C-alpha cells in the first residue's frame, strides 16, 4: 500500500469559455445566477495509480488533455472535480528553466530555483558539483545565463532537475533537447533515477520511449482515458486512434464481410503456394489510406503480424514482420507486381521490395474479379523508431517479365505500369530489445558484415 | 526525504471544486525565504545592466522629492505653520511621500503580480498570494531603506531624533499590510478584467492628490477635513508625519482606523482570491 506514490481519483477539468470578457462581468453581476459561458471539458474522470519506481507513459493525440493532466499533477492548475494524492515532492520538466533569472549566473540560478522548488540550500550545495558536471557547459556555468545559447539553457535546467532526485518526476515532451549525446545522457539518467526509486510520469509522442521506459501507459483522447495498461497494447490503441477509427477489426469486418473468415463460403479458389491468412484482429483500418491509382484495382485488406501470425505493431529490432495485403482486381491486368515500401519518421525511404525482386512465380495475366493476396516477410533489422509503410501494385507485360533480368533499370522502369499505390497503409514501431543490454547495431539499419581482429604482440 | 511538508498536505488540491484551505499566513510563512529573497533580488536586479544599478532605486524618488520641494517652496512658496526650520519642507514632504511611494508601488505591482508572474503560475505550484506578498515585501524594503536615508538627512540637518521614530516601522508595516490586501484583492480581479489595471494607475494619482501628502493639511478647506476619515491612506500618512516630524503620538481613533484597514483588507483580498483561485490559472 505504501508503494503507491501517485494516486489519482476521478480527476476532471473544465474550462469556462466566454465569448466576450463582459460575459464574466455579467455573470458576477447576477451573482452567478445566469451563465454566459460554455464549459469545455479538458479531462473527464481520470483515475490511476503509479507505484514507486514505476514509469507511466501518457500518450494521445494533440489536445487530448495530456498537458492539462500534468499541470494538475504538478499543482499548477486546480482540478474541477476529483482528487489526487502524491507523496513526496514533484518536479516537472514543464518548469524547465521557468525560475531562472537572466542576470544571474548558472550557479546562482540553480540555487535560486531549487529553493523556489522547495529544496534547502544545503541539499543543493551537495549536488552542485554533480549538476555542473552533468550540464557540461564549461565556464558558462559561472556566467549570466542571458549569454547562454538555448541549448545550454536547457542543459542547465535539465541537469538541475535530474540531480535534485525528486520522488516524482513529470516529463512533458521535454527530452527533445540538446544534441543527440546529451539526449542519450538524459535517458540514461532517467533510467538511473527510476532505479533509485523515482517515479516517472512521461508524456511523449515518441512511441519508442514509451515502449522502452514505461511499465504502463495510458491513452488519452478528448479528455477521456480510453486505455490504461501495458505499453504495447496502449501503443496499438493509440495507433488505432491516429488512424481516425474505432477498433480496427470492427471496421474491417464490415467492409469485407465473409472474405477473411470463412474460406468455404467465398467463391475464390487458391492458386499457387498457399499461406495462412491472419485472423480478423490483425487487419488495419482502411478508412484513412491514401489510395492512388487508375481504378484497375483496389486494396481490400492490410494486416501486420509477427512471426506467430498474431497482430503486431510493435517489434523489437531484428524481429520478422509479416505484411499481408490483398488487392481486388477490377480490370484485367498482366503480370502483377506487389510491393512494399518502408519509410521512417524523418520520411527517409528505408526499404522497398517487390515481387519482382523476390523472383516470385506469377501468372501471365490476372482477370478482373480476382483477389490477389500477398504475404511479405521483412526482417526489421533497423534502428528503433516509428515507421510507416506504403503498398503498391504494378503490372508488366509477360514477355518483359521473362526478360526482366536482361533489361536495364531504366528500360524496366518504363515498362512497369503502376496500378495502385496505397499511402499511409499503416505504421509500426521498432523498439530496442527489451532484455538485452546492447543494441545489435547503431544507426538506421543493420548491414550484413563481418569483423576480424589480429593481435600483434610486441617483444620489447 | 521531503523538505516541505506543506507541499504535501497544505497545498494539495482537495475535494471537488474546493481547494483545500491553505491558510494564508501559513503559506506566506512557508515561502518566507522565497518572498524575502525575491523581493531583495527584485530591488537589486530591477536596474541590472544599467551602469549605476541599485542606486537608481534611490535616485528616482529623490528626483521627485526635489521637484516637489522646488515647486512648493520656491514657486508656490508654501509655509509650514508648525516648524520653522529652513529645510522643513523637504522633511515634511519625505515623511509623507516616501510611505506613499511604497504604498502605491505595492498596490500597483501587487495587483499586477499574477500577470507579471504568469510564467510561474502557469507552470509551478506556488500559491498565488506569494507573488503579491513579494511585491509588498520589495516595496516595504525600499521604504525602510529610504527611511534610513531620511533619518540620516534629518540628523545632518540637526533635526533631533526622538524615540517616536521607532514607532514608524510599525505604522509603515500596517500601511503596507493595507496595500498588500488591496493588491491581493485587485490582483485576482485584474486577471479577468485587465482594464482595471489601467484605471488603477489613474485612480492612484487622484488618490495621492486627495490626500495631504505633498501639501500640508492646513491648506485643506474645513469641509474636506471631515471627509479625510474616509480616506484610508489619511490616518497612516498623518500618523507617520506626527511621529516623525511633530513628535506627537496620534489619537486612539487613528490607531483604530489603521488597524482596521490593515487587517480587514488582506482578509477581504484573501476571500476574493479564494473564490476566484480555481479559475485564475486557467485564464493566465
Image (cartoon, helix red, strand yellow):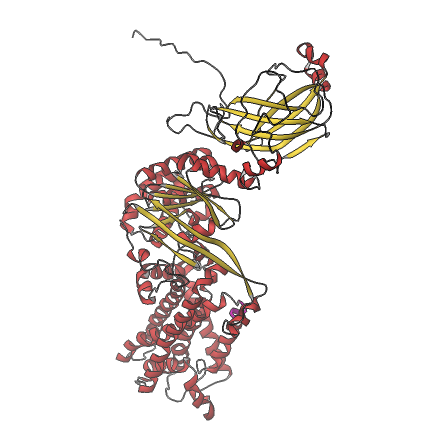
Farthest top residue? A459
Residue occupying image coordinates x 56% and y 34%: A284
- For the residue pair A373 and A58, the one nearer the viewer reads as A373
- Which residue is nearer to you in this view: A255 or B148? A255
Q: Is B29 situated above or below A28? A: above
For the image, the number of numbered tags is 0
Residues shaded magenta: B194-198
Residue A78 shows in this picture: no
Quadrant hosting residue B83: bottom left
Residue A14 in magenta? Answer: no
Image quadrant assignment for residue A342:
top right
Residue A11: percent from left, percent from top: 42, 54
Task: Give the answer, above or below, for where A180 lies relative to B207.
Answer: above
> Which residue is painted at 56% across and 22% down in the image?
A376
Does A364 appear above or below B244?
Answer: above
> Measured from the top left, where is residue A21 in percent x and y?
56, 66
* A331 left or right of A340 in image: right
Q: Position of residue B199 (x, y in %)?
A: 53, 72
Left or right placement of residue B100 versus residue B197 in this view: left
In the image, farthest residue toward the bottom: B222
Kindly report the secondary structure that dominates the magenta region of the rendered protein.
helix
In this view, A130 is above or below A77: above
Of B114 and B90, nearer the camera is: B114
The image quarter in which residue A229 lies: top left
Amino acid at each position: 500500500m505504501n508503494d503507491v506514490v501517485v494516486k489519482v481519483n476521478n480527476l476532471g477539468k473544465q474550462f469556462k469559455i466566454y465569448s466576450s470578457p463582459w460575459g464574466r462581468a455579467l455573470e458576477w453581476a447576477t451573482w452567478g445566477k445566469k451563465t454566459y459561458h460554455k464549459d469545455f471539458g479538458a479531462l473527464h474522470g481520470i483515475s490511476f495509480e503509479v507505484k514507486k519506481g514505476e514509469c507511466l507513459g501518457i500518450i494521445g493525440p494533440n489536445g487530448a488533455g495530456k498537458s492539462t493532466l500534468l499541470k494538475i499533477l504538478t499543482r499548477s492548475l486546480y482540478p474541477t472535480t476529483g482528487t489526487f494524492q502524491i507523496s513526496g515532492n514533484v518536479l516537472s520538466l514543464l518548469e524547465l528553466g521557468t525560475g531562472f533569472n537572466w542576470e544571474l549566473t548558472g550557479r546562482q540560478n540553480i540555487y535560486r530555483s531549487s529553493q523556489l522548488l522547495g529544496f534547502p540550500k544545503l541539499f543543493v550545495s551537495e549536488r552542485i558539483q554533480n549538476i555542473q558536471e552533468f550540464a557540461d557547459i564549461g565556464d558558462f556555468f559561472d556566467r549570466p545565463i542571458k549569454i547562454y545559447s538555448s541549448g545550454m539553457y536547457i542543459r542547465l535546467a535539465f541537469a538541475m532537475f535530474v540531480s535534485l532526485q525528486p520522488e516524482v518526476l513529470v516529463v512533458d515532451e521535454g527530452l527533445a533537447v540538446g544534441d543527440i549525446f546529451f539526449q542519450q545522457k538524459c535517458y540514461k539518467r532517467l533510467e538511473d533515477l527510476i532505479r533509485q526509486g523515482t517515479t516517472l510520469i512521461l508524456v511523449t509522442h515518441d512511441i519508442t520511449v514509451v515502449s522502452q521506459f514505461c511499465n504502463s501507459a495510458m491513452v488519452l483522447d478528448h479528455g477521456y482515458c480510453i486505455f490504461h495498461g501495458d505499453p504495447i497494447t496502449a501503443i496499438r490503441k493509440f495507433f488505432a486512434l491516429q488512424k481516425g477509427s474505432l477498433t480496427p477489426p470492427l471496421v474491417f469486418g464490415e467492409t469485407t464481410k465473409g472474405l477473411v473468415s470463412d474460406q468455404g463460403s467465398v467463391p475464390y479458389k487458391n492458386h499457387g503456394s498457399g499461406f495462412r491468412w491472419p485472423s480478423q484482429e490483425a487487419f488495419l483500418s482502411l478508412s484513412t489510406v491514401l489510395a492512388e491509382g487508375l481504378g484497375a484495382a483496389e486494396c481490400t485488406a492490410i494486416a501486420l503480424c509477427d512471426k506467430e501470425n498474431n497482430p503486431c505493431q510493435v517489434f523489437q529490432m531484428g524481429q520478422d514482420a509479416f505484411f499481408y495485403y490483398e488487392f481486388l482486381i477490377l480490370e484485367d491486368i498482366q503480370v502483377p507486381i506487389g510491393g512494399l515500401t518502408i519509410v521512417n519518421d524523418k520520411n527517409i525511404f528505408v526499404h522497398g521490395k517487390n515481387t519482382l525482386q523476390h523472383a516470385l512465380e506469377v501468372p501471365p495475366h490476372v482477370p478482373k474479379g480476382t483477389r490477389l493476396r500477398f504475404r511479405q516477410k521483412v526482417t526489421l533489422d533497423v534502428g528503433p523508431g516509428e515507421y510507416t509503410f506504403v503498398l503498391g501494385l504494378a503490372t508488366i507485360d509477360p514477355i518483359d517479365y521473362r526478360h526482366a533480368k536482361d533489361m536495364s533499370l531504366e528500360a524496366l522502369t518504363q515498362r512497369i505500369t503502376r496500378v495502385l499505390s496505397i499511402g499511409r497503409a499503416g505504421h509500426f514501431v521498432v523498439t530496442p530489445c527489451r532484455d538485452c543490454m546492447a543494441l545489435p547495431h547503431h544507426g538506421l539499419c543493420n548491414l550484413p558484415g563481418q569483423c576480424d581482429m589480429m593481435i600483434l604482440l610486441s617483444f620489447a | 526525504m521531503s523538505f516541505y511538508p506543506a507541499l504535501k498536505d497544505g497545498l494539495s488540491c482537495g475535494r471537488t471544486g474546493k481547494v483545500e484551505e491553505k491558510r494564508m499566513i501559513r503559506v506566506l510563512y512557508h515561502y518566507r525565504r522565497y518572498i524575502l529573497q525575491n523581493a531583495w533580488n527584485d530591488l537589486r536586479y530591477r536596474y541590472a545592466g544599467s551602469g549605476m544599478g541599485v542606486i537608481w532605486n534611490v535616485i528616482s524618488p529623490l528626483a521627485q522629492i526635489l521637484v516637489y520641494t522646488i515647486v512648493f517652496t520656491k514657486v508656490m512658496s508654501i509655509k509650514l505653520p508648525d516648524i520653522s526650520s529652513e529645510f522643513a519642507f523637504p522633511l515634511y514632504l519625505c515623511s509623507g511621500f516616501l510611505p506613499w511611494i511604497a504604498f502605491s508601488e505595492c498596490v500597483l505591482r501587487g495587483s499586477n503580480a499574477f500577470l507579471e508572474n504568469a510564467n510561474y503560475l502557469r507552470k509551478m505550484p506556488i500559491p498565488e498570494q506569494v507573488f503579491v506578498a513579494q511585491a509588498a515585501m520589495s516595496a516595504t524594503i525600499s521604504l525602510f531603506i529610504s527611511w534610513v536615508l531620511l533619518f540620516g538627512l534629518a540628523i545632518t540637518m540637526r533635526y533631533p531624533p526622538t524615540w517616536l521614530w521607532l514607532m514608524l516601522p510599525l505604522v509603515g508595516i500596517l500601511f503596507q499590510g493595507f496595500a498588500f490586501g488591496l493588491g491581493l484583492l485587485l490582483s485576482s480581479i485584474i486577471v479577468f478584467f485587465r482594464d482595471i489595471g489601467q484605471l488603477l494607475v489613474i485612480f492612484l494619482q487622484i488618490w495621492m492628490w486627495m490626500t495631504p501628502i505633498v501639501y500640508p493639511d492646513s491648506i485643506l478647506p474645513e469641509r474636506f477635513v471631515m471627509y479625510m476619515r474616509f480616506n484610508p491612506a489619511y490616518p497612516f500618512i498623518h500618523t507617520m508625519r506626527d511621529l516623525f516630524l511633530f513628535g506627537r503620538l496620534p489619537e486612539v481613533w487613528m490607531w483604530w482606523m489603521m488597524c482596521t484597514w490593515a487587517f480587514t483588507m488582506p482578509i477581504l483580498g484573501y476571500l476574493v482570491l479564494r473564490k476566484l483561485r480555481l479559475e485564475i490559472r486557467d485564464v493566465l
